[in-house]
Amino acid sequence: MTAEEREAFLSEVHIGVLAVEREGRAPLAVPVWYDYEPGGELLIWMDGGSVKDKAIKKAGRLSLVAQTETFPYKYVTAEGPVVANDAPPTREQALKIAHRYLPGEEGTKYVDGALSDNSVLVRVRPEKWLSNDQSKA
């Protein structure tokens, strides 16, 4: 994929799989909801103090892969340093992430129940990319 194609793909709605190194264990790999706009930062909202949050704080960087699960298969992996992960998302940021995955009122209800002072918005600057588009094979 070209740079523009991979950034456009990552900005589409996909469940992301976050991967982050852990000392003495296999890397943590878990599904996450995220937000991304081409040229911007990757945004991931999670609970502070969670296994994900602790691993990310220790590693200081992560990878996120998004993929299609139907033919023609495509995937994009973005890797980079954590720019910030010390504050909760604003309500607007949380709603933007939730509404990518849940329609209308469902997304709002999710945010109302999940957003708290313990929430953390992880911001990542993508620096390295891997991608493949089987439709081009």
Image (cartoon, helix red, strand yellow):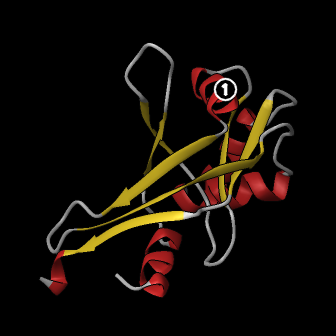
Whole-percent x and y of residue 94? 74, 51
Q: Which residue is drawn at 67% across and 38% down?
A: 60
Above/below status of 119 relative to 71: above
Q: Residue at x 41, y 16 (%)?
A: 25
Q: Which of 17 and 97 is in front in this view?
A: 17
Answer left or right for 126 relative to 74: right
| Secondary structure beneath label 1 | helix
Residue 17's image quarter? Answer: top left
Whole-percent x and y of residue 27? 42, 28
The amino acid on which the numbered mark 1 sits, given as a three-letter code, is Lys
Q: Residue at x 49, y 48 (%)?
A: 63
Is any atom of residue 78 visible in this view? yes
Residue 134's image quarter? Answer: bottom left
Q: Which residue is drawn at 18% across and 86% down?
A: 136
**Residue furthest out toward the top:** 24
Whole-percent x and y of residue 47? 70, 29
For the C terminus, give its image quadrant: bottom left
Q: Nearer the viewer, residue 42 or 22?
A: 22
Answer left or right for 110 relative to 16: right
Q: Nearer the viewer, residue 123 or 44?
A: 123
Q: Residues within 10 Å of mark 1 (few under 14, many from 20)?
A: few
Whole-percent x and y of residue 118? 81, 27
Above/below status of 59 relative to 129: above
Is any atom of residue 103 visible in this view? no
Residue on which the image places disc 1: 58
Q: Nearer the viewer, residue 113 or 120?
A: 120
Answer left or right for 1 relative to 123: left
Residue 28's image quarter? Answer: top left
For the N terminus, give its image quadrant: bottom left
